[in-house]
Image (tube, rainbow, N blue to C red):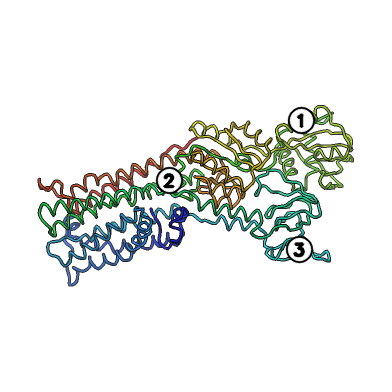
């Protein structure tokens, strides 16, 4: 359907309008639900006292003083309460010179209302009261169903803002710290960032060593080591060491604020698309005006102007707006939405759901989408008399209390293998190098190449070749060292690829859809993942502000692009893409920026989404054919083409045809439930 009332019409001329126009504020949903039930209750007496309904069902309504006014008075109330919202929404379509559903509905109910009121004072005319109220009821029901099935909250910018801490620990001149609002920070201030805390502003490390999780901003899957002179980004999370950071940028100048601006710009620049039902209604609007004009001219030329000619014209205009058109698309949308939800997809934007059928390129973020976004042990090599079980037992014990993601990866791998952790003592964290502990009287070290260099140890041949191969695959290697002299094991760690990713990419290729990958990770990591999954093209070392530019570049090549991502750094790209698909386990920001949410974190759901979009669009087209097809016959008959042979279509008979098409539309929409979405 077209625009809803109470929207900020200043946006109507911009491409932002349609995104906002279909935002399902719960207030609008409640408003349409309330108006539907009230209008329906008031319509029942109108239908009951209708002469046509009485004649059709063979009963006579009771008469009493004033009963003749029940129908017109209640119809006026229904028009004012249930019909006026459509008139206000039609103003927007009129202002945009884009006639759609609202102008078609408004044309029909206004003409029916005006003529019916006039008929009370003109002899020999038949009012359209019962047709008027049932048309309003059906259209209110359609709007309510649409809103209930497509709730959308546009809170991406609010979610981005939540990444920023509210307060910071500023270091005073005396060396103490004071808690201040982040807004009170200024360039040159020094702040203390404790382990696990978020960095409050962009800055440079003045003192301390730690690693920082920047995945939500840059997409880099591994923690980034920081020491004096390193740059840090607001909103990222400090890991295991304390940092003193000298503030270089605050407020609107931070990288996170820049991402927020990109999200806003990308949302507003999304191409405006009229929905299928609006386009069909627009065509019918022009067809109705043309048919009414031809009818008026032809009858005036044939018999002169009369009340009968006016009734012909009014009949054409009223019949041109079929009841079924109000339900043709909302019914499919409602079933489509529930079907999608049962299959782990939440639809937040109807335009995007319709667009998904035209996709020819799907761009996946790597970290957290094609991969799990967490380090996992992907290989292990041992030397001497050590075996894998013993290596995991000791390594997991040494890393037993650490929350560092490498420590978690080793513990998880040990648990998966059913290995218990060794008992350790005298644990010590070696800043920037690794850890040291005592296991069964032996000193054991666990760390990276820097630790090997510091201890001056030679690699055994098998460990050296294992490390070389892991390095060529862009994997991190952690070494287990005994007595500061012997490397006894090496663990290769990498961002673990989801099992479902390969199947999803194969299925997309089978549908003729190209697959690309965006990542902030290094060229080596991107190349390795791309080769393993058979991805068509990849973009590596992409900064957050460049991600939506890559999407725009693909679009400039004429491609219909979907972006699948889960992080803050994906938010602008999700908003820029023709279809933004957010992984449900991702950040709230990505979810709020996405048009469609994959609840089950399964990339294969992208395939199901495209299939459902194609099937739903096909059902919408079929329903619109049924909903409007009778116009091909009804409009000429209502205009009086067969009047010379004594056949004239009355509004009442036209209403029967409309009812039949409504039933057919409802039955056809329900067939969508049986669609096969297997990939």
Say which element carries label 1. Answer: helix
Q: Is 155 on the left or on the right of 191, as rendered?
A: left
The CA span between labels 2 and 1 is 51 Å
Say which element carries label 2. Answer: helix
Q: Which residue is mark 3?
A: 170
| Residue found at the far bottom of this picture | 65
The CA span between labels 3 and 2 is 53 Å
The residue nearer to you, when weighing 360 against 323, is: 360
Say which element carries label 3. Answer: strand
| Residue occupying the point 78% across, 57% down | 244
Question: Residue 336 has which mark?
Answer: 2
Pointer 3 and pointer 2: residues touching (CB < 8 Å)?
Answer: no
Q: Is 72 on the left or on the right of 10, as rendered?
A: left
Residue 436 coordinates in the image, percent (x, y)? 85, 44
Q: Which residue is mark 1?
A: 468
Residue 340 coordinates in the image, percent (x, y)? 47, 45
The residue nearer to you, when weighing 463 against 577, is: 577
Query: What crowding class fits label 2: few (fewer than 14 Cα within 10 Å), some (14-19), or many (20 or more)?
Result: many
Q: Is 635 on the left or on the right of 345, as rendered?
A: left
Residue 399 coordinates in the image, percent (x, y)? 78, 44
Residue 260 coordinates in the image, percent (x, y)? 59, 55
| Residue occupying the point 58% across, 33% down | 535
Residue 21 lies in quadrant: bottom left
Q: Is residue 125 above or below residue 510?
A: below
The CA span between labels 3 and 1 is 44 Å
């Amino acid at each position: 359907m077209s625009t809803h009332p109470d929207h900020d019409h200043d946006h109507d001329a911009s491409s932002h309008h349609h995104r906002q126009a279909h935002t399902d504020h719960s207030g609008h949903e409640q408003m349409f639900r309330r108006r539907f039930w009230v209008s329906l209750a008031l319509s029942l007496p109108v239908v009951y006292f209708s002469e046509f309904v009485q004649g059709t069902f063979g009963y006579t309504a009771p008469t009493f003083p004033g009963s003749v006014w029940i129908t017109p008075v209640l119809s006026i109330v229904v028009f004012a309460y249930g019909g006026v919202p459509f008139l206000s929404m039609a103003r927007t379509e009129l202002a945009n010179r884009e006639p759609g559903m609202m102008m078609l509905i408004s044309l029909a109910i206004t003409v029916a209302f005006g003529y019916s009121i006039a008929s009370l004072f003109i002899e020999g005319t038949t009012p359209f009261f019962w047709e008027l109220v049932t048309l309003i009821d059906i259209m209110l029901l359609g709007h309510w169903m649409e809103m209930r099935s497509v709730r959308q909250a546009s809170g991406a910018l609010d979610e981005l803002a939540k990444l920023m801490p509210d307060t910071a620990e500023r270091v005073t001149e005396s060396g103490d710290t004071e808690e201040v609002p982040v807004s009170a920070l200024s360039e040159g201030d020094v702040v203390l960032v404790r382990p696990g805390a978020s960095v409050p502003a962009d800055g440079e490390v003045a003192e301390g060593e730690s690693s920082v999780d920047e995945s939500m901003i840059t997409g880099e899957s591994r923690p980034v080591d920081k020491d004096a002179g390193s740059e840090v980004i607001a909103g990222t999370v400090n890991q295991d060491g304390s940092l003193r950071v000298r503030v270089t940028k605050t407020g609107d100048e931070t990288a996170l604020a820049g991402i927020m601006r990109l999200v806003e710009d990308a949302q507003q620049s999304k191409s405006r698309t009229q929905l299928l039902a609006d386009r069909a209604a627009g065509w019918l609007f022009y067809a109705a005006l043309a048919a009414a004009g031809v009818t008026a001219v032809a009858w005036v030329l044939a018999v002169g102007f009369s009340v009968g000619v006016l009734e012909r014209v009014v009949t054409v205009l009223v019949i041109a707006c079929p009841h079924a058109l109000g339900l043709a698309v909302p019914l499919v949308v409602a079933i489509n939405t529930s079907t999608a939800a049962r299959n782990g997809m939440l639809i937040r934007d109807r335009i995007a759901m319709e667009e998904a059928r035209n996709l020819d390129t799907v761009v996946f973020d790597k970290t957290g989408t094609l991969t799990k976004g967490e380090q996992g042990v992907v290989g292990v090599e041992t030397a001497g008399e050590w075996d894998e079980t013993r290596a995991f037992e000791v390594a997991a014990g040494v890393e037993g209390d650490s929350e560092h993601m490498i420590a978690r990866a080793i513990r998880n791998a040990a648990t998966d293998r059913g290995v218990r952790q060794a008992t350790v003592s005298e644990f010590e964290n070696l800043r920037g190098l690794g850890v040291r502990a005592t296991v069964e009287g032996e000193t054991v070290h666990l760390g990276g190449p820097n630790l090997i260099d510091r201890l001056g140890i030679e690699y055994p041949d098998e460990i050296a070749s294992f490390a070389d191969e892991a390095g060529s695959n862009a994997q991190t290697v952690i070494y287990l060292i005994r007595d500061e002299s012997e490397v006894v094991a090496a663990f290769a760690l990498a961002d673990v690829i989801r099992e479902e990713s390969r199947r999803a990419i194969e299925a997309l290729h089978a549908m003729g859809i190209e697959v690309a990958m965006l990542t902030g990770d290094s060229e080596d990591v991107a190349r390795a993942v791309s080769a393993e999954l058979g991805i068509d093209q990849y973009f590596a070392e992409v900064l957050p502000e460049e991600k939506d530019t890559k999407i725009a570049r693909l679009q400039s090549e004429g491609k219909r692009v979907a972006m699948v991502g889960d992080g803050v750094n994906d938010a602008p790209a999700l908003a820029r893409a023709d279809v933004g698909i957010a992984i449900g386990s991702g950040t709230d920001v990505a979810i709020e920026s996405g048009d469609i949410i994959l609840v089950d974190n399964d990339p294969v759901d992208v395939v199901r989404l495209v299939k459902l979009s194609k099937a739903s669009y096909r059902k919408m087209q079929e329903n619109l054919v049924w909903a409007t097809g009778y116009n091909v016959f009804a409009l000429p008959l209502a205009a009086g083409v067969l009047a010379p042979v004594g056949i004239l279509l009355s509004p009442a008979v036209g209403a029967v045809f409309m009812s039949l098409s409504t039933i057919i539309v409802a039955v056809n929409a329900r067939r969508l439930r049986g669609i096969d979405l297997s990939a």
